[in-house]
Image: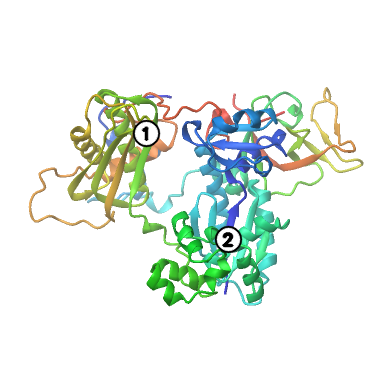
Amino acid sequence: MKVNYIGKISEENLPAIFVPYFLESVHAGFPSPASDYIESPIDLNKHLIKNGAATFLVRAQGQSMVGSGITDQAVLIVDRSIKPSHNSIVVATIDGEFVCKRLKLKPRMCLMPDNPEYPPIFINHGQELEIVGTVTAAINKF
Amino acid sequence: MAFALVDCESFYASCERIFRPDLKNIPIVVLSNNDGCVIARSTEAKKMGIGMGVPWFKVRESFLKENGQVFSSNFTFYGDMSARVMNMLEGFVPRVEVYSIDEAFLDFDTLKQNYNLYDFSCHIRTLVRQWTGIPVRIGIAPNKTLTKIAINEIKRRNIPASVLHLSNKKEIQNALAHTSVGKVWGVGRKLTEHLNKAGINTALDLAEINPQGIRRKFSVVLERTVRELRGERCLDIDDDISSKKQIVVSRSFGQRISNLKELRPIVSNFAVRAAEKLRNERQKCSQVSVFVRTSPFNRNKPQHSDLKTIELFTPTNDTRDILTAAKRGLLPIFKSGYDYAKAGIILNKFSDEKTKQYSLFKDPNEPKQNMRLMKYLDQMNNYETQIYYASQNTKKWSPMKQNMTSPKYTTNWYELPKVN
């Protein structure tokens, strides 16, 4: 665990992001000319997660989806409330394991990797496939 | 007129299964703090005859031999999953009472008349399962006590849809006849013995007694239960989340602690956490209690347990004030020569954060009351940084002896589930 000793805390040395600049009461003098134009800062959570209760983050492993821009160790945003369709990137369980692949419903249903070096996964008789959710975004850190 | 009770099926075990598809149909048990007793069992584990609350060492061998999977409790994860389920439920109806980590009452009165409550509940069940992965049972009935009976009936009759609507008298009576009186909501073990002696064995027996007589012979509370079993409604949905009257932060230690130097930082941790919770509730408190105790299971060691309450003249929710009070409370109750097993902080006497009451006299321990500073600290601690007070224990202090905990799948970047 990281421990930060920051000594005496005053407003000046707090990181800017936590200071609600424009929510402060107006002191004597002129109010900020910008205060009418303030919008809330860009929020990645809002942008990436539409349904918090149904969204889970998982970590991708391996190169099988590299063609879709999912590199090894990417964080995937999985929304369980979105019904997958043909060509959706999904997280599914097959043989008791989680996989992330592209769902193909035609000509024959399969889980298609996005890397020519990996073969498609067809669902054989007696095999159980469960789609957990639809991948809505991948975060690759550089 | 109907309420519904949504009850998560073997909640902890179901949570453990969400990110472990390999555990489908495999018996799962979850153990209490310090891995002492079984506190949750999957259906498969129940079928093996593993009882609720049995000491783990007694069933360990046979359970593992059958390839059962055991987990230490992972409350961080269960808490997050619970919040997701409750969040969803609040989207279905306007009035929801979160009753426990895995149960919530829903007010169906607010729905349109002639609404098919059974179909609606099936819809809720399907969606909760789909979105969160948690299977739930839903019991619908005229009042809270009967929704509990409905849930029992779903379990007893093993109803595959996991939804039951006790809508008419005949169905209710049939359900009551099959419920033993000890399973009625609010009837404890002692009371059950008394009732059995009086010849009351089933919930139906209890429902058929004159409520006034019950009040004379037993209590107002039991009278209320009888009235509800008869179909009256005595208890409303309590969706007032501000009704919290007390905050307790306490934990058993993984290892016994016998000196003040070690104990103080831990108590400080509790105080800091309690103050955070207090601010979350937007309340201030004017009473801080500290308690310590040795282990009652350690019979051959000297026992000591004590509690000290510190009154604050001016209500506060500033961590520094709570810390000061906690330290003042700990000193007189700590006695050396004992092996302490548990300690905790209790906050009482709440008042609204916004009201400020001035004292006629100057408070000798004038509270610091810097709400802004606290707000910044809370915000920062919500992120990845961690700011500590000097008296706290900054080591990643592991409170429990737990070896079989699953990852914090949903709350820790480094423990996310992996997919191939």
Q: Residue at x 67, y 34 (%)?
A: B20
B168 or B409: which is nearer to us? B168
Reading the image, the residue beneath label 1 is A15
| Residue B63 visible in the picture | yes
Q: Chain of mark 1?
A: A
Q: Image check: B391 left or right of B89?
A: left
Q: Nearer the viewer, residue B105 or B131?
A: B105
Please tell me the numbered disc located at residue B180.
2
Q: Position of residue B109 (x, y in %)?
A: 56, 72
Label 2: element kind: loop
Quarter of the figure with residue B328: top left
Where residue B401 sits: x, y (%)? 46, 27
Which residue is nearer to you in this view: B147 or B355? Answer: B147
* Residue B232 higher or lower than B51, as above or below: below
Which residue is painted at 37% across and 58% down in the image? Answer: B243
Q: Quadrant of residue A94?
A: top right
Tell me how far mark 1 sits from mark 2, CA to CA. Answer: 61 Å
